[in-house]
Image (cartoon, grey):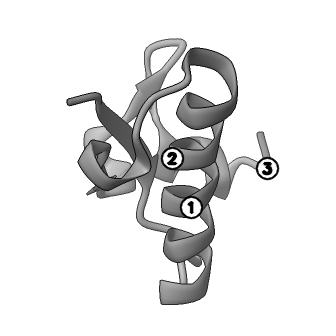
Amino acid sequence: MPYVNIKITNEDVTPEKKEALIKGATQLLVDVLGKNPATTVVVIDEVNTDNWGIAGETVTNRRKEGK
């Protein structure tokens, strides 16, 4: 049973986008590894931008600075 964990910041992530991520990740495992989609689990973790850092800064601050 494949398990895929997608971690993204919680910015503009609609239910439709999440559904597309789940379908796409599942299909990728089917296409590349021949996995059964019925037993493929995909979990999306949305992380607040205050809790995600890049280059020593939170994503919140990077967004404010236009990075």
Give the crowd class for mark 3: few <14, some 14-19, many >=20 residues within 10 Å.
few
Binning the other alpha carbons within 10 Å of mark 2 as few (below 14), some (14 to 19) or many (20 upward) gives: many
Check whether the beta carbons of the residues at disc 3 and disc 2 lie within 8 A of each other.
Answer: no
Q: Relative to the observer, which residue lies in front, 64 or 36?
A: 36
Name the residue located 57 percent from the left edge and 35 percent from the top edge.
30
> Left or right of 43: which side holds 55?
right
| Image marks 2 and 1: residues in contact by CB distance under 8 Å | yes
Of residues 32 and 65, the one nearer the viewer is 32
Relative vertical location of residue 20 with respect to residue 6 in this rendering, above or below: below
> Which residue is identified by label 3?
66
Q: Where does the image place residue 11, in percent across and percent down from the top left? A: 53, 69
- Between label 3 and label 2, give the one nearer the viewer: 2
Q: How many marks?
A: 3
x and y percentages locating residue 23 in the rendered image: 56, 61
Looking at numbered disc 3 in the image, what kind of residue is underneath it?
Gly
Q: Type of residue at label 2? A: Thr
Q: Which of disc 2 and disc 3 is earlier in sequence?
A: 2
Residue 26, numbered circle: 2
- How many residues crowd around disc 1 within 10 Å: few (fewer than 14), some, or many (20 or more)? few
Residue in the image at 79% along x and 50% along y: 66
| Residue 50 pos. (x, y %) | 31, 50
Q: Quadrant of residue 28?
A: top right
Q: Label 1 is placed on what type of residue?
A: Lys
Q: Nearer the viewer, residue 61 or 1?
A: 1
Residue bearing mark 1: 23
Vertical placement of 49 versus 6: above or below? below
Of the image marks 3 and 1, the number of the one nearer the N terminus: 1
Snapshot quadrant of residue 31: top right
x and y percent of residue 18 in the render?
Answer: 50, 71
For mark 3, give the secondary structure: loop
